Image: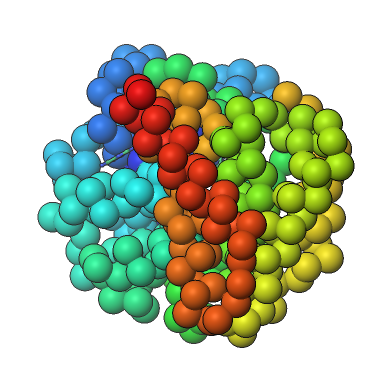
Amino acid sequence: MKIAILGAGAMGSLFGARLAEAGQAVTLLDIDDAHLGAIRSHGLRLQTAAPDRWVTNLAVSRPEQAGAQPDLIIVFTKSMHTRAALTSLRHAIGPGTYLLTLQNGLGNVEKLREFVPLERILAGVTTWPADLVGPGHVRSHGEGAIRMMSADGTVRPIVGQVVDALANAGLRCIADPDVWAAIWEKVAFNAALNTLCAVLGCTVDQLDLTPDGRRLALSIALEVVSVARARGIDANPASVEASVIHAIENHRGHQPSMLQDILAGRRTEIESIGGAVVAEARAAGVAVPDTACLLHLVRLAEARAVTGA
Ligand code: NAD
């Protein structure tokens, strides 16, 4: 397959490199010229559990300069940059081009729908971890998986082709008819841990310094699950609760991405996580007081960070 990765930061670089190593024709599209330049000069340095290596069979380009129409575009910008990124790539989206989003949060499919019909959108969730160490250098420690499906739930040949491409690249991927439950469960996890750590400036394990941290994290996670269930999505409260507790007890020293963004003075994904949950809760008539409170606090923290106030 001819695959373009739109947004080749931590996750886009990891996925692009693994797919290219497996023999797919991959182009990384990004607006970070230092990152693109480093890959153009030396290839992408990939650090995983396997020995470090340089992946050199990656094409790179800014989106507005992208050429041939890809079979698949994997969108891996942060959610607040999806629209701008796809707008600059609109010329390269052909009538046979499919779009896949594995981004965190809610509302990603709706953004992609502004560019292609629903039947050409695939959506899912991934637990693979990745960090961009510097220009041309990505690190991924730990194992993960991908669950995905066509956005309208119809099992088309493209679903199997993309699952096979990702699985053959070692990225453990399954087609999952219950993908929306998985997406909401990850939103619940992120709404709890990302927002609390972003506001408090603490690592995930530090939420356990008093019983209040764990209690608040679980309250937010379960509020989000209750919204999902009110919307007819079968998110599992017990498994969300277990993954929040597991993270608090085991993710020592981990700064969630929302905290990293605040510390770097960047915008966060709060609107597609807390913001989207509160909007869905309102529509479903479900009360989410803790999630709403954290949404307002993160917005404030983000405004301070971005303006340098
Ligand atoms: P990142 O910030 O490392 O990468 C995003 C990339 O998008 C950057 O390189 C940025 O330059 C690029 N970009 C921004 N605007 C652009 C534009 N207009 N055109 C093209 N490129 C543009 O983010 P990430 O950590 O790779 O996360 C990407 C998505 O995956 C997010 O939704 C995140 O929540 C999700 N996710 C991340 C992880 C992780 O471990 N990093 C795990 C699972 C899911």
In this rendered view, identify the residue nearer to me: 80 or 99.
80
Q: Is residue 163 visible?
A: no
Quadrant location of the N terminus?
Answer: bottom left
Taking the spot 52% from the left edge, 64% from the top edge, the residue there is 277
> Would you say 280 lies left or right of 87 here?
right
- Pinpoint residue 5: horizontal percent, then vertical percent: 37, 45
Taking the spot 45% from the left edge, 17% from the top edge, the residue there is 134
Taking the spot 15% from the left edge, 42% from the top edge, the residue there is 64
| Residue 161 position (above or below residue 295) | below
- Pinpoint residue 211: horizontal percent, then vertical percent: 86, 42
Q: Is residue 259 visible?
A: yes
> Would you say 8 lies left or right of 188 here?
left
| Tally of numbered discs | 0
Dividing the picture into quadrants, the one containing residue 53 is: top right
In this rendered view, identify the residue nearer to me: 46 or 182.
182
Taking the spot 53% from the left edge, 81% from the top edge, the residue there is 284
| Ligand 1 falls in quadrant | top left
> Would you say 191 lies left or right of 32 here?
right
- Pinpoint residue 10: horizontal percent, then vertical percent: 49, 33
Quadrant location of the C terminus?
Answer: top left
